[in-house]
Image: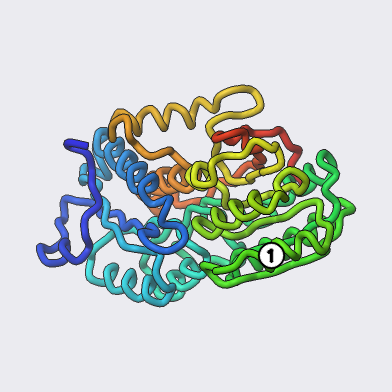
């Protein structure tokens, strides 16, 4: 990574003072907590975005530098630190992916002049001025995928399982509407704290309700743990699973899937029904040239952060959200292969 842009420590930056010839992009990335397994991918792809921007002249001639803070901590801790750093001049704009409870806390805490790009799938609801969400809302992300699974996999009895915070609750509300419209029913639901120590009660709920499908709105390490236990319990070959947070790192961590019953509706995959996703593969190739043959995978969260950095430096006049396309992919070994679906209204 010689010559590559590396994230700065914000407190080290404040000791020397921000430079006027540098455009500082704050990166709120989960370096701890359940999403930490995605951090290496995200930091490398954000660095790639900064390198490419600098090669093109930076932002109005100013070099783009990255300033990282850990968004995997408690929401109020992350929000208080980010607000203090912005007021001190540590970054010009903030880009982040993290859980939506952190997102809500940041919106409340950041000063009115702060610009903030939130890149993963989000919980919906109103936005304050200066905030852009580049990911999908719960209905945009899940409705078409659930409808496809009901019609094509005959999954009519669903259990909704998630972590007890704002995004899973919003996902479950959207899922109930989509499943009812598709002629399916919700036969069970559970929300658990981060880091559940025993997946047994959740597996028992799936068995007891004779579910055909499980919608998973856990993230990161918790999602990996559940999928491992689900497979160990022998449920993986007869019950469809759909996740709005399963990406490439998480799929590698569970050892892939050979059942054809594990699906994801994240926004980026390495292959599609028509063959390789060349945009994704080219991004991975550029990352490998930058970081070497052991470069982390360009996962969906990381790709969102890469695009978020580019949106963040585009200026207030172009500070707009692009509508995401509905996506559905089946886990095929250690890959996610896209399945064509017709988006719902």
Above or below — where is 329 with respect to 112? Answer: above
Measuring from the top left, give residue 75's x and y in whole percent.
44, 73
> At 55% across and 69% down in the image, what residue appears?
197
Horizontal side of 274 relative to 52 (left or right) equals right
Measuring from the top left, give residue 186's x and y in whole percent.
82, 62
> At 47% across and 61% down in the image, what residue appears?
34
Above or below — where is 46 with respect to 216? Answer: above
Measuring from the top left, give residue 341's x and y in whole percent.
73, 37
Q: Residues within 10 Å of mark 1 (few under 14, many from 20)?
A: many
Horizontal side of 14 relative to 226 (left or right) equals left
The foreground one among 212 and 38 is 212
> At 28% across and 74% down in the image, what residue appears?
84
The foreground one among 88 and 180 is 180
**Picture quarter with the N terminus:** top left
> At 32% across and 30% down in the image, what residue appears?
293
Q: Name the residue under label 1.
A: 202
Measuring from the top left, give residue 96's x and y in whole percent.
41, 57
């Amino acid at each position: 990574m010689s010559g590559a842009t590396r994230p700065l420590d914000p407190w080290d930056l404040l000791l020397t003072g921000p430079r006027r010839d540098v455009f500082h992009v704050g990166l709120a990335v989960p370096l701890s907590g359940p999403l930490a397994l995605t951090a290496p991918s995200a930091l490398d792809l954000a660095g790639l975005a900064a390198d490419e921007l600098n090669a093109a002249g930076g932002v109005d001639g100013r070099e783009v530098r990255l300033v990282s803070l850990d968004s995997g901590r408690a929401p109020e801790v992350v929000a208080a630190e980010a607000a203090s750093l912005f007021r001190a001049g540590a970054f010009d704009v903030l880009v982040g992916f993290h859980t939506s409870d952190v997102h809500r806390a940041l919106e409340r805490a950041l000063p009115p002049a702060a610009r903030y790009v939130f890149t993963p799938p989000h919980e919906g609801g109103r936005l304050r001025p200066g905030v852009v969400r580049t990911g999908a809302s719960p209905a945009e992300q899940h409705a078409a995928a659930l409808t496809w699974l009901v019609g094509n996999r005959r999954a009519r009895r669903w259990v909704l399982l998630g972590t007890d915070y704002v995004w899973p609750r919003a996902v479950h509300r959207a899922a109930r509407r989509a499943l009812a419209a598709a002629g399916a029913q919700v036969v069970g639901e559970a929300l658990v704290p981060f880091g559940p120590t025993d997946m047994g009660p959740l597996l028992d709920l799936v068995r007891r309700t004779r579910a055909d499908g499980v919608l998973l709105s856990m993230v990161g390490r918790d999602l990996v743990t559940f999928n491992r236990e689900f497979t160990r319990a022998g449920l993986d070959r007869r019950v469809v699973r759909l996740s709005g947070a399963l990406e490439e790192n998480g799929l590698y961590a569970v050892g892939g899937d050979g059942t054809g019953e594990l699906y994801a509706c994240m926004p980026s995959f390495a292959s599609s029904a028509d063959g390789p996703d060349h945009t994704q593969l080219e991004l991975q190739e550029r990352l490998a040239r930058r970081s070497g043959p052991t470069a982390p995978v360009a996962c969906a969260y990381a790709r969102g952060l890469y695009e978020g950095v580019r949106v963040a430096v585009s200026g207030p006049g172009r500070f707009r959200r692009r509508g995401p396309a509905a996506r559905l992919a089946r886990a095929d070994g250690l890959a996610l292969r896209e399945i064509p679906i017709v988006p719902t209204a």
